[in-house]
Amino acid sequence: MKSFNSFGIANRPILDFVMELLNQVVEIIKNEAEYRTTIHSDQGWHYQHNKWIKTLKQNKIFQSMSRKATCADNAAMENFFGILKQEMYYGEELVSYKELEQKIEQYIDYYNNKRIKAKLAGLSPVQYRTQTNQSAA
């Protein structure tokens, strides 16, 4: 089973931004997904917009949404953002938006491919998932 991850960065929440990312996901999964696809989000206005919901339904994507004021529903992402801020942001000088964007992209690459975790047998997330997928095959 393949797993696809993507992220985007914008300086303000606009519908076109999230729709562009959703359309990228749709292109990836339409020929690759073996099982039901689920997209989880918070209750941001753009994830409740008719255009977003219609696109999910047209592509048989299940929508999972956090309950209002319940950050525990999205604990994995909240944990990641906490780690990101702690490891790359706190105590650093303010930089331009473009520099911040580059630093976040570099950090996500580091986090996924190089940063080891004890809970993942001392492997990075990508190394662990690759090893797990190879063992299952």
Image: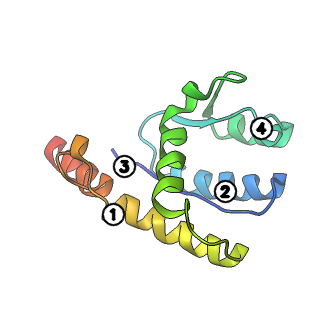
Q: Nearer the viewer, mark 1 or mark 2?
A: 1
Residue topped by disc 1? 113
Q: Position of residue 80 (x, y in %)?
A: 48, 46
Q: Is residue 34 above or below residue 91?
A: above
What is the CA distance from the residue labelled 1 to the residue labelled 2? 22 Å
Residue 5 appears in view: no
- Disc 1: CA contacts within 10 A as few (<14), some (14-19) or many (>=20): some
Residue type indicated by callout 1: Asn
Q: Residue at x 72, y 73 (%)?
A: 97
Q: Are marks 2 and 4 in contact (CB under 8 Å)?
A: no
Residue topped by disc 2? 21
Residue topped by disc 3? 2
Judged from the image, the secondary structure of the residue bearing numbered disc 3 is: loop
Q: Residue at x 40, y 48 (%)?
A: 3
Q: Which mark is residue 44?
A: 4
Q: Position of residue 4 (x, y in %)?
A: 46, 52
Residue type indicated by callout 4: Gly
Residue 104 found in image quarter? bottom right
